[in-house]
Image: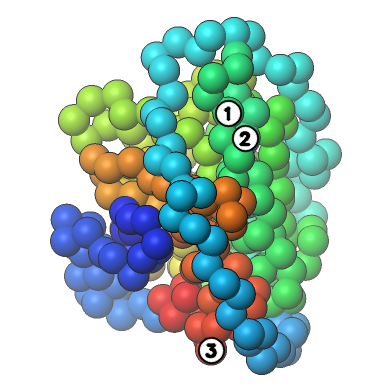
Amino acid sequence: MVGAHGRHEGLAVADAGLLRGSDLLDRSKLLLPRLAPPTTAAPVAAAAPLAARPSLALERVIAPPPEHFDGPASPQAPPPARLFAPPASTGAGGTWAVMIGINNYPGTKSDLSAAVNDATDVNEALARLGVPGSNRLLIRDGQASAEVIRAAVNWLNERAGPDATAIFFFAGHVRKVGDGRESLVAADGGTVSDADLAARMRGLRAGRVWVGIAACYGGGFNEVLQPGRILTGAAPANSLAYENGGFQRSYMVQYMIREALIEGRAGTTTIEGA
């Protein structure tokens, strides 16, 4: 489990309290292979010249959401139709991914600017690695109610078998609700607690799982961990995350996904390498 809590260092700065997940990976002998089979993955292009870094004056800490939002939620949008469609097969191999990004929250004072781009970038990276569209579920803004987030985990459970790689990625608000307790905040203002998420993911049979939380307190979702799983948080369990208006992404996704995977700067297509 890797945690990044800072500024322009992105994922290069790991919080010592989050390194317990490395021991878990050592015990499970896990090294994630390519996210898609080599026969279907597109070759990684040579990295383009590195663009100038945006000014730190454009960065901002992501303020935690209030206990009660200052207005109603925007009308819900229907999620992708295949979320509730019966699976063509169960227990399949390959890569299966759910990516959730929420900028638009109830009221007017708690919106984000980078979360939708974060989820979209993960979707793009997987597409470039050859993961078919039928295996990728991108859920954005008004689509992402608490009910839909729970249903998305069930979608993974039904489809990803023991030989599969499964990905659950969330970018949006996380609310700290107690010592060692965090909740994903949905677009409708509802929540999905870390305990609820972990309980639902116990039904996930995939042998390799990456959980990415591009949000404040993301490292606190370690309840989801078990052998074969990696958790990456944009901030440790008790810290806030940052985004930069020049990137229009979180630091986590700018470095780990856009630059490392999409632009090919990691020189690898593994989660560890990214």
Q: Is residue 1 left or right of residue 99?
A: left
For the N terminus, give its image quadrant.
bottom left
Secondary structure beneath dot 2 equals: loop
Q: Specify the amino acid type for callout 2.
A: Asn
Residue 26 in the image, given as x and y percentages of width and height: 24, 77
Q: Earlier in the sequence, mark 1 or mark 3?
A: 1
In the rendered view, tell whether residue 92 sits above or below residue 61: below
Residue appearing at x 48%, y 33% in the figure: 173
Asked whether, in this view, residue 21 is left or right of residue 131, the answer is: left
In the rendered image, residue 266, in percent from the top left (x then y), is placed at 51, 83
Residue linked to disc 3: 267
What is the basis of the colouring in this image? rainbow
Helix, strand, or loop for circle 1? loop
Q: Nearer the viewer, residue 52 or 134?
A: 52
- Residue at figure coordinates x 53%, y 89% from the top left: 267
- Of labels 1 and 2, earlier in sequence is 2
At 22% from the left and 59% from the top, the residue drawn is 15
Can the viewer see residue 205? Answer: no
Q: Earlier in the sequence, mark 2 or mark 3?
A: 2
